[in-house]
Image (spheres, helix red, strand yellow):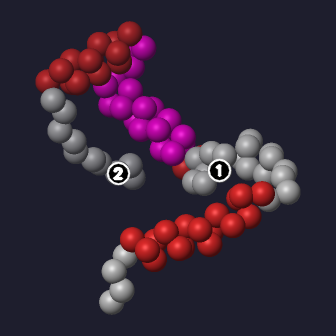
Amino acid sequence: MPAVRSLRLDPDLDKKLQRAATLRGESVSEFIRRAAADRADATLAERPGRGFDDVAGAIHSEGGRARRSGAAFAEALSRDRPRR
């Protein structure tokens, strides 16, 4: 049995949904179901942390200043924080 959900829509959004559903030849309920399914699919298909796949590891270097960046960051934090 399908789940029944209830939601509140502001009047402007309700009118917009009615117009859009009419243009598609769908009921408002069907329009909302399809929109919810599309958004859920898109959200679940996203892989967090994968937004930089095309550039991660693309640059190779000898290290230079970046080699010591972690230590420099830790030193900066320790200078700026009072000891407990």
User: In which quadrant of the rendered view does residue 72 lie?
Assistant: bottom right
- Quadrant where the C terminus sits is bottom left
The answer to whether residue 39 is above or below residue 73 is above
| Three-letter code, disc 2 | Ala
Which label number is shown at residue 64?
A: none
**x then y, percent, for residue 9:** 19, 33
Write down the region rendered in magenta: 24-43
**x then y, percent, for residue 48:** 57, 54
Q: Residue at x 31, y 25 (%)?
A: 28
Q: Residue at x 50, y 35 (%)?
A: 38
Q: Nearer the viewer, residue 34 or 54?
A: 54
Asked if the stretch drawn in magenta spans residue 66, the answer is: no
Q: Nearer the viewer, residue 10 or 65?
A: 65
Which residue has dot 1 on it?
A: 50
User: In which quadrant of the rendered view does residue 49 lie?
Assistant: bottom right
Neighbour tally class for label 1: few under 14, some 14-19, many 20 plus, Cα within 10 Å: few
Which residue has dot 2 on it?
A: 3
In the image, farthest residue toward the top:
23
The answer to whether residue 4 is above or below residue 69 is above
The answer to whether residue 84 is above or below residue 32 is below
**x then y, percent, for residue 40:** 48, 44
